């Protein structure tokens, strides 16, 4: 039995797994998680522009902690664990790239590519440095160091971060909070790209826990 799982198959944060599916061997989890974009390009919307005006969104780099489809928990400055009963459908970096591309696409002003497109005028890449739960502050944290390279090879960088505070260390609380923080970071990046990426420095947002 073959089943293809994609990061944005459904609007739900939690996707049920059929009993015959196993991720990485061993007992299959009862459910896996994905990210849902709060901003979507409307059905039938078109953007007409030359390929040279396109933006290529590249999957961000991560360290090894985010190399697994798990939710890391920062216990202190040196210790990291993984949240129980929480597993992503794909690596966090790939899920975030899809969310970021869709959020920029929803603005309706750019041709956005997620696969290699050598004619794209600009490339957005970066490093996802946080995508998990901070036990010390009881916060879901998403941090993305964006790098934007233009056709003239000029480079701009900016750090974006969002936190949802007051989150209990349970999968059913942390996952929606991460989805909210990821959408906030994606919206910040989309605005930055849309205004020409002028300026450097950090964009940071703290959010109340989802009700």
Image: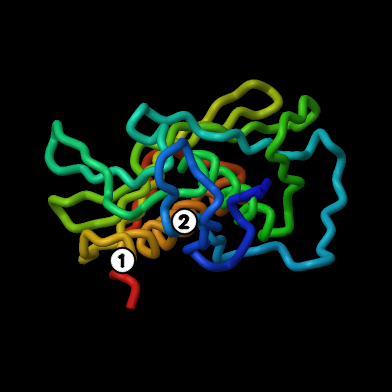
Is 66 on the left or on the right of 57, as rendered? left
Q: CA distance from mark 2 to mark 1?
A: 12 Å
Is 89 on the left or on the right of 41, as rendered? left
Instruction: Rate crowding at label 1 as few (under 14), some (14 to 19) or many (20 or more) other CA atoms within 10 Å.
Output: some
Q: Earlier in the sequence, mark 2 or mark 1?
A: 2
Q: Position of residue 131 (x, y in %)?
A: 36, 45
For disc 1, the marked residue is 173
Look at 55% across and 57% down and name the residue there: 18
Instruction: Rate crowding at label 2 as few (under 14), some (14 to 19) or many (20 or more) other CA atoms within 10 Å.
Output: many
Look at 13% across and 51% down and name the residue there: 136
Residue in front for this viewpoint, 105 or 75: 75
Image position of 168 with respect to 143: above or below: below
Q: Position of residue 150 (x, y in %)?
A: 65, 29
Residue in front for this viewpoint, 142 or 28: 28
Image position of 12 with respect to 32: above or below: below
Look at 52% across and 56% down and name the residue there: 19
Q: How many marks?
A: 2
Image position of 181 with respect to 110: above or below: below
Look at 87% across and 51% down and name the residue there: 48
For disc 2, the marked residue is 33
Is 81 on the left or on the right of 162, as rendered? left
- Where disc 2 sits, the SS reads strand
Question: Looking at the image, do the residues carrying marks 2 and 1 touch, with CB atoms under 8 Å apart?
Answer: no
The label nearer to you, 2 versus 1, is: 2
Q: How is the image coloured?
A: rainbow
Q: Quadrant of residue 41?
A: bottom right
Residue in front for this viewpoint, 187 or 71: 71
Q: Is residue 187 visible?
A: no
């Amino acid at each position: 039995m073959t089943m293809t799982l994609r990061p944005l198959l459904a609007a739900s944060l939690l996707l049920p797994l059929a009993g015959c599916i196993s991720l990485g061997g061993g007992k299959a989890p009862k459910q896996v998680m994905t990210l849902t974009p709060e901003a979507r390009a409307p059905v039938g919307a078109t953007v007409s522009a030359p390929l040279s005006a396109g933006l290529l969104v590249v999957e961000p780099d991560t360290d090894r902690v985010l190399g697994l489809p798990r939710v890391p928990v920062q216990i202190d400055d040196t210790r990291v664990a993984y949240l129980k009963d929480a597993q992503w459908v794909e690596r966090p970096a790939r899920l975030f790239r899809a969310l970021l591309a869709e959020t920029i696409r929803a603005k309706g002003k750019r041709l956005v590519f997620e696969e290699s497109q050598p004619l794209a005028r600009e490339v957005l890449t970066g490093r996802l440095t946080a995508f998990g739960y901070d036990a010390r502050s009881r916060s879901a944290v998403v941090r993305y160091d964006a790098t934007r390279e233009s056709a003239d090879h000029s480079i701009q960088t900016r750090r974006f971060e969002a936190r949802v505070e007051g989150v209990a260390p349970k999968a059913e609380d942390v996952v929606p909070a991460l989805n909210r923080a990821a959408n906030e970071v994606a919206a910040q990046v989309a605005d930055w790209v849309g205004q020409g990426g002028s300026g450097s420095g950090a964009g940071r947002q703290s959010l109340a826990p989802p009700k």
